Image: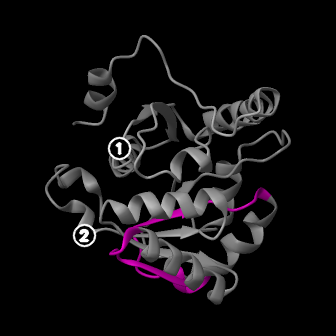
């Protein structure tokens, strides 16, 4: 299912089922928390089911009421419209292969993966090479820190680039991420451009270290909010 047919503010979130692989880690947990708060059904995936269940329970404790569950990875992706990969680069090959048989035909994979070294191709492209040929891959959230996302009551005031080869797929991810207050999804071009997003993430990590902060992000100046959202049909 694509969100494009469901206007924002009119209940499309309740029709979505999203999996977050690596949802027990910092970024994955924060993404799952934000989506669950917005009413999206979220299934947290982990190599160990008990860890996934624990993370889901923590989110329920924070929010009080949410549709969030914990499963082992290959079960977490079953029947999901969108699957976020918030896993280490080193685990891509293993996890992608393990969940591939369970992916719903036509599901959208969102790579939030960042390699700590330059490999010539982006992590998203590498992920795509390990998934079924029909899987649609988009990359996002590279420059958004877990510490910024985890505070669900605080607007972010930052941008994230959305990379992908299909404009409708990018629109779906942009609209889904619009539930995060203060986060603007900016069109970053084709999937191969995600290598630049990854490189900038490594740069931001240095900024965080030098200034003793944990949530430095980016904001594209000279780009009006109206233009950003018009791009996605809002």
Which class describes the residues within 10 Å of circle 1: few (<14), some (14-19), or many (20+)?
A: many
Seen from the viewer's position, the closer of residues 114 and 107 is 114
Image quadrant in which you'd find residue 148: top right
Looking at the image, which residue is at 72% across and 47% down? 114
- In the rendering, which numbered label is found on residue 43? none
Query: Which residue lies under the disc numbered 1?
Result: 171
Looking at the image, which residue is at 54% across and 86% down? 75
Q: Tell me if I can see residue 22 in this picture.
A: yes
Which secondary structure lies at badge 2? Answer: helix
User: Which residues lie in the magenta part?
Assistant: 63-89
Query: Which residue lies under the disc numbered 2?
Result: 15
The x, y position of residue 158, in whole percent, is: 49, 31
Which quadrant holds the N terminus?
bottom left
Give above or below for 128 relative to 71: above
Residue 9 falls left or right of residue 20:
left
**Gap between marks 1 and 2, in whole Å?**
17 Å
Seen from the viewer's position, the closer of residues 109 and 9 is 9
Which class describes the residues within 10 Å of circle 2: few (<14), some (14-19), or many (20+)?
A: some
The answer to if 87 sits in the magenta stretch is: yes
The x, y position of residue 182, in whole percent, is: 39, 36
Badge nearest the viewer, 1 or 2: 2
């Amino acid at each position: 299912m694509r969100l494009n047919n469901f206007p924002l503010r009119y209940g499309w979130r309740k029709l979505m089922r999203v999996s977050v692989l690596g949802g027990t880690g910092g970024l994955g947990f924060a993404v799952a928390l934000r989506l669950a708060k917005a009413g999206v059904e979220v299934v947290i995936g982990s190599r160990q089911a008990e860890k996934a269940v624990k993370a889901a329970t923590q989110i329920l404790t924070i929010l009080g009421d949410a549709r969030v569950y914990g499963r082992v990875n290959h079960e977490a992706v079953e029947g999901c419209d969108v699957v976020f990969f918030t896993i280490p680069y080193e685990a891509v090959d293993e996890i992608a292969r393990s969940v591939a048989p369970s992916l719903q035909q036509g599901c959208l994979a969102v790579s939030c993966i960042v390699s700590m070294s330059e490999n010539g191709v982006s992590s998203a492209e590498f992920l795509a090479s390990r998934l079924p040929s029909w899987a649609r891959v988009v990359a996002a959230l590279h420059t958004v820190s877990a510490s910024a996302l985890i505070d669900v009551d605080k607007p972010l005031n930052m941008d994230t680039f959305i990379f992908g080869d299909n404009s409708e797929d990018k629109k779906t991810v942009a609209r889904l991420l619009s539930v995060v207050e203060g986060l603007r999804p900016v069109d970053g071009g084709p999937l191969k451009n995600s290598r630049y997003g990854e490189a900038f993430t490594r740069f931001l990590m240095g900024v965080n270290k030098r200034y003793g902060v944990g949530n430095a992000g980016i904001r594209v100046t000279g780009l009006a909010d109206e233009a950003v959202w018009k791009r996605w049909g809002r």
